[in-house]
Each structure stands twice: as structure tokens, then as C-alpha cells.
């Protein structure tokens, strides 16, 4: 292959405006110029084709015809590609200016690689800004278990892949999962190479199917199909296996699918919080692998599931209390002085401080991101946790910086219901549900910004009211 290998960019399009313009502008800025764009348009009606036809500065080959699916559109574009190397692009992804230059340099460094991939920036996501996703080195077992994930920020070696360079059109979603697995098995996992660099910006909101909560059920179905094909699994039987071998295959399948659903649950919680779709995947993970440590961690994120670690039992709660108690219906059944918030010597050495100012107890967090500042035990005997709803009400009268307040289980180092306090000099109340889940402490720590925060706590109270189903969360 020449020192200046040709690069084909495969781009399926269906009504891609306005994001398509940003993707094309990214191609105009490429420092490596030996590339061509192969567009497979699915009869767009928003002006995408007219815009693409106006492009000057690099070769553009456009075919506009109906296709059966996005996967079919990619396959049609890939079949038309003529380059030594191929980039699978999308209308809402923007290549960095030197992305193709890096891909070609990496190809010269790893001429036997069938796929070289890197990290990407995710924008407009649930994190409140830009987040960099850097995948780990490719390992097939980790990939199947969803402990690592590749990205589309990469380049395929079309010459080496040959007839294996296609997507499985029987899948409605995640064809890349099947392709990566097939490439690793046919060519060797070492020929899928990860480079620790960022070469692309992608959207992480509803414009991308990967971030639409309603799509995760289909992701799970398609990935289950792929796993079952790999294992030769058909219903409750597996072909060619019996006895202990079948039991092993059954275990491997359950472990992989449990991890898949647990990963989806974590992603969905970031997107929609403690919603039914999040809980569906937690329950599915538990069905495949009861007692997996990740189950308890996922349950602690929300309030609609109960976990019994001794019995490995996961149940959906009835009559989940509202986040804030109904006005006038809850009474104070206990209180803890703010001075009881303790700072460990280790936290103090890192910069945590407590002082009395303005008649209030003021806590200053360490300056480092996520550093712990103070903690108060909440063990209160005599609470009827099975017959009443309870809340921890924390009243603050000053907040500076980005501090976080939560309930905490020191034995498991588990943080539950964490709230970022709003900067204010006014009095404000925050509520946390207090329940029988081991979270028996109130924790204050710093947020993501690497600077100290301060909080003046006026009161910590325990509220209670009789269970009233008409006020329960759905």
C-alpha cells in the first residue's frame, strides 16, 4: 500500500440537516486530502441531497435511492467504497481537522490492523457539557461482557477485511457489535487496535439513537441474538453441548447478558434517572445473575427497588414516598445538631474545615474534586420504617461553590440520592428519603470542580408521616 493510501468515507444520509453541514465542514478542514466521500442517501426530503451536490473541494459520490434500514444504507455505501482505508461516518459526527491524517499514520504504524479506533467527545449529553469517552484496549471477553466498548472514531482496512467488511442486516440495531466480534474471531483480537487520542465529536442527546431511552430494549434484543448465535444457544438448549458443558455455556450466557443489562441500566439512569425503563434493565440483570455485586449498586441509585443482600432478593417497592413530603402532613420526629457533622483526620489533612460563623456551622470542603468533607450518623432508634415514610430534611442558609449532599453507607462506601446544592445566601431545604437500606449517614463532599466549596448548615431533622398511597410516586 502506498505512503498516501486512499481513504473512503461512507456516509448514509436520511434528512441529515442541519447537523450534516457541521459534518461536511469537518471534512473540508481535513489536513489529509487523499479522500473521497461516498454518500448513500435514503431519498431525503429536507434538502440534504441538494446541499451535498453543492460541495466543492473534494470528490463526492452520491446515490439517492430507497433503502431498507440504516444498516442497509451503510452496506450500500461500504460496497461502493474504493479506498484502501474506510471511515464509517454519520451525519451528526464531526471529525477533528487532523483525524484522517492520524488514521493514515496509525495505519502505517499498524499495517496488519483491520480496525484502528480512538476516543471521541460527547456533547449535549446528560452530563451538562462535553465529556470525553476513551475506550480501553480491545479485549473480546471484555467487549462481550460490556466492560469496554469501541467507538466509530476509527478507520477500517478494506484491503485486509475483504469479504468480511459488511454489517449484518438481520439486526435492527448494533450491527457494529456483531462486526467487531466477527473481526476479532476471524482475524484475532490483537488486530483491533486502540489509540489513546480523540479524533471525533459526536452528539450524546436524542439526536443519536444511542441516547434514546426507548431504543435500549431493541439494543438488548439484538445483542442477545448475537450472543446466542455465538454460543449456539437455542431456547433452553445449546447445540452440541451436554452435561457440564451445557451448564458452562448457560453460565457464560447468563453472565454476559446480566452485564449487558446492568450496563444499559447505568446508561439509562444517566439519561432518565429512576424511570421504569431503568428498572426494567436492573430487574433483567438480576434475573440472569442474582446476587451480582452490580445489582446492589444499581438499586442504590433509585428508590423504586428493594434489595435483600442476604437472600439475593430484588423486589419492586410499593407506595414509594414523594421526594418532598406533602406540606403539613409530615412531623419532626428527631433532630441532629449540625455540629455533629464530623470531619475525619484524613479529610482535615486534605483541607476540610468546620467553623462557627454568623451563628451557624459552616463547612468548607477540600479543594480537590469529589473529596469528602464531613459526615453525620443518622441512626435513630424507634422509627417505624415498615409503616411510615421518613425523610432527612437538611436546612442550609449559605452555599458557595459546587458541594454535594447525600445519604451514605460507610460500610459499603455507597452514596445514595446525591444532590448538588445550589449556590445561595438564602435559606433552603433539601430532602432525602430515609429507609432501611443501610444508608445511615449524611455525607457532604465537594463536586467536580477542583476548588473548595462552603456550606452553612442550620438544621438536620428527621420527618415522618403515615404511608398515604394517594401521595406515592407512580
Image: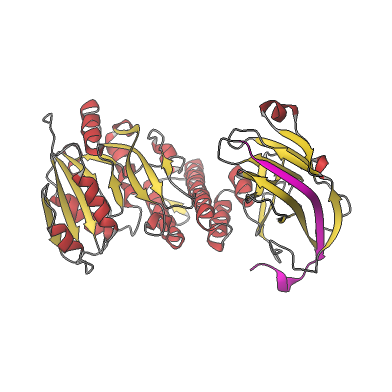
Horizontal arrangement in the rendering, residue 304 relative to residue 113 (left or right)? right
User: Which of these two is toward me, 454 or 292?
Assistant: 454
Q: Can residue 36 be found in the magenta stretch?
A: no
- Can the viewer see residue 70? yes
**Residue at (17, 62) in percent of width and height:** 49
Q: How is the image coloured?
A: secondary structure
User: Which of these two is toward me, 170 or 438?
Assistant: 438
Give the quadrant of the C terminus: bottom right
**Residue at (62, 36) in percent of width and height:** 452
Q: Quadrant of residue 451?
A: top right
Number of numbered discs: 0
Image x and y of residue 306, in percent: 68, 55
User: Which of these two is toward me, 379 or 276?
Assistant: 379
Q: Which residues are magenta?
A: 452-474
Horizontal arrangement in the rendering, residue 205 relative to residue 60 (left or right)? right
Horizontal arrangement in the rendering, residue 270 relative to residue 313 (left or right)? left
Q: Quadrant of residue 371?
A: top right
Image x and y of residue 72, in percent: 23, 58
Q: Quadrant of residue 171?
A: bottom left
Amino acid at each position: 500500500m502506498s505512503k498516501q493510501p486512499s481513504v473512503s468515507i461512507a456516509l448514509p444520509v436520511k434528512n441529515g440537516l442541519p447537523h450534516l453541514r457541521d459534518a461536511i465542514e469537518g471534512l473540508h478542514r481535513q489536513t489529509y486530502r487523499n479522500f473521497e466521500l461516498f454518500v448513500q442517501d435514503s431519498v431525503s426530503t429536507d434538502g440534504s441531497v441538494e446541499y451535498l451536490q453543492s460541495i466543492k473541494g473534494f470528490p463526492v459520490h452520491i446515490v439517492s435511492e430507497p433503502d431498507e434500514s440504516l444498516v442497509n444504507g451503510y452496506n450500500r455505501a461500504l460496497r461502493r467504497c474504493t479506498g484502501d482505508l474506510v471511515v464509517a461516518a454519520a451525519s451528526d459526527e464531526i471529525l477533528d481537522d487532523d483525524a484522517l491524517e492520524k488514521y493514515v499514520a496509525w495505519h502505517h504504524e499498524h499495517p496488519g490492523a483491520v480496525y484502528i479506533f480512538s476516543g471521541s467527545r460527547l456533547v449535549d449529553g446528560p452530563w451538562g457539557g462535553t465529556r470525553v469517552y476513551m475506550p480501553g484496549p480491545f479485549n473480546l471477553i471484555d467487549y462481550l461482557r460490556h466492560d469496554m466498548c469501541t467507538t466509530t472514531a476509527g478507520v477500517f482496512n478494506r484491503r485486509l477485511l475483504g469479504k468480511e467488511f459488511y454489517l449484518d442486516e438481520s439486526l435492527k440495531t448494533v450491527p457494529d457489535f456483531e462486526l467487531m466480534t466477527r473481526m476479532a474471531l476471524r482475524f484475532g483480537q490483537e488486530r483491533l487496535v486502540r489509540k489513546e487520542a480523540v479524533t471525533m465529536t459526536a452528539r450524546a442527546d436524542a439526536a443519536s439513537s444511542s441516547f434514546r431511552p426507548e431504543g435500549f430494549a431493541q439494543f438488548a434484543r439484538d445483542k442477545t441474538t448475537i450472543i446466542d448465535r455465538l454460543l449456539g444457544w437455542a431456547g433452553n438448549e445449546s447445540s452440541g453441548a451436554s452435561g457440564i458443558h451445557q451448564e458452562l455455556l448457560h453460565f457464560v450466557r447468563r453472565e454476559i447478558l446480566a452485564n449487558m443489562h446492568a450496563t444499559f441500566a447505568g446508561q439509562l439512569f444517566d439519561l432518565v434517572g429512576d424511570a421504569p425503563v431503568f428498572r426494567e434493565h436492573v430487574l433483567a440483570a438480576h434475573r440472569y445473575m442474582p446476587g451480582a455485586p452490580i445489582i446492589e449498586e444499581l438499586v442504590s441509585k433509585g428508590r423504586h427497588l428493594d434489595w435483600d443482600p442476604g437472600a439475593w432478593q430484588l423486589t419492586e417497592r410499593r407506595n414509594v414516598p414523594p421526594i418532598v413530603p406533602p406540606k403539613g402532613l409530615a412531623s419532626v420526629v428527631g433532630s441532629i445538631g449540625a455540629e455533629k457533622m464530623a470531619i475525619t483526620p484524613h479529610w482535615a489533612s486534605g483541607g476540610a474545615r468546620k467553623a462557627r460563623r454568623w451563628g451557624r456551622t459552616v463547612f468548607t470542603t477540600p479543594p480537590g474534586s469529589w473529596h469528602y468533607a464531613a459526615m453525620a450518623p443518622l441512626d435513630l432508634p424507634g422509627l417505624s420504617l415498615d409503616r411510615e415514610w421518613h425523610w432527612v430534611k437538611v436546612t442550609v442558609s449559605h452555599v458557595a461553590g459546587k458541594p454535594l449532599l447525600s445519604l451514605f453507607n460507610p460500610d459499603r462506601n455507597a452514596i445514595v440520592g446525591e444532590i448538588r446544592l445550589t449556590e445561595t445566601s438564602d435559606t433552603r431545604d433539601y430532602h432525602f428519603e430515609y429507609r432501611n437500606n443501610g444508608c445511615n449517614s449524611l455525607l457532604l463532599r465537594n463536586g467536580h470542580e477542583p476548588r473548595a466549596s462552603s456550606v452553612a448548615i442550620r438544621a438536620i431533622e428527621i420527618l415522618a408521616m403515615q404511608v398515604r398511597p394517594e401521595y406515592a410516586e407512580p
